[in-house]
Image (cartoon, rainbow, N blue to C red):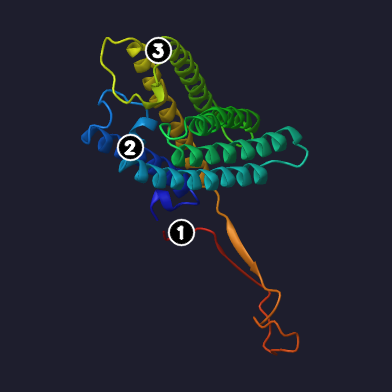
Amino acid sequence: MWWFQEGLCILPVALVLWTTATFIFDYITAVVLRHVDPLVPYISDTGTVAPERCVFGIMLDMSAFLGVATVYVRYKQVQALTDEEESKLHKLNILGLVLGWTSSFGMCIVANFQKTTLFFMHLVGATLTLGVGALYILVQTLVSLYMQPHVHGKSIFWVRLSIGVWTFASIISMFVSSVIMYSSLPGVDVAHKLHWIPGETGYIPHIISTISEWSLALSFVSFFLTYIRDFQKITLRAEADLRSNHMYDSPHYRITTPLNQSVTSPLLAGGI
């Protein structure tokens, strides 16, 4: 059995690889077609113009689905490892589930509402994805703090804390530089500005903002990499409970064959 077949670690692995491939593919396509500048464009700019925006939407929707699944498995794992009297951990775990799913939903909004089409909705999606996602990282870091040393060692907590600091530093840098950029370009439709000339007004804060956004995306990817070892130690199973031994609507139909009350099978087969 390969390492990625152990437990459910295929979920964070697939999430990280698929999301990274989404960013790289769209960047290469947008640069080759000269829709954006090669030097650190906004991630959203690489998925603004057809045809790359079509692929960007599909691939990012799949990342959102993988995010929902990964967040849910993390929630079930913490729930199983937490005693009933640990109310603080239970509350943080539920909060993490809500924040994680909200962030994934924001990713769908970003994928389907391009900034040049509906900028306000795109901004809402970005806030949910990045802002709420940062809060998810914070909550999971606190969960790791309260779960050590009886569940895992201190090293994983320090790794997640470092990534959390990296995430919030990137958010602050992106926010401040974006405010400076927009304030220095009054009357300019920045949302539709896909090409920048070095030395023009607002260029430096623009570059700082885009670098911060890519840094932020990389911090999110790095955080989910910390789930791989944990997910090797958990599996989920789907159980089918049969309420009848036939599919007819008529109550007069009967089959005397003994009814198999339930069927249990792995949610994700180990042979994938």
Q: Residues within 10 Å of mark 1 (few under 14, many from 20)?
A: some
The answer to which of 242 and 82 lies nearer the viewer is 242
Q: Earlier in the sequence, mark 2 or mark 1?
A: 2
Q: Earlier in the sequence, mark 3 or mark 1?
A: 3
Residue 256: x %, y % from top left: 70, 90
Give the structural element (helix, strand or loop) at label 3: loop
The answer to which of 148 and 120 lies nearer the viewer is 120
Q: Amino acid at mark 3?
A: Leu
Of the two numbered discs 3 and 1 in the rendering, the one whose residue sits closer to the viewer: 3
Q: CA distance from mark 3 to mark 1?
A: 55 Å
Question: Measured along the vertical axis of the image, is residue 267 above or below residue 150?
Answer: below
Q: Which mark is residue 185?
A: 3
- The residue positioned 78% from the left and 38% from the top of the image is 85
Q: Amino acid at mark 1?
A: Gly
Q: Would you say residue 149 is visible in this rendering?
A: no
Q: Which mark is residue 112?
A: none
For label 2, the residue is 49
| Marks 3 and 1 close (CB-CB < 8 Å) | no
For label 1, the residue is 270
Q: Is residue 210 left or right of residue 128?
A: left
Residue 78: x %, y % from top left: 63, 41
The answer to which of 247 and 71 lies nearer the viewer is 247
Q: Quadrant of the C terminus?
A: bottom left
Where, by quadrant of the figure, is residue 36 drawn? top left
Q: Earlier in the sequence, mark 3 or mark 2?
A: 2
Q: Amino acid at mark 2?
A: Val
Where, by quadrant of the figure, is residue 84 drawn? top right
Q: Would you say residue 53 is visible in this rendering?
A: yes
Give the structural element (helix, strand or loop) at label 1: loop
- The residue positioned 52% from the left and 34% from the top of the image is 121
- The residue positioned 37% from the left and 27% from the top of the image is 192
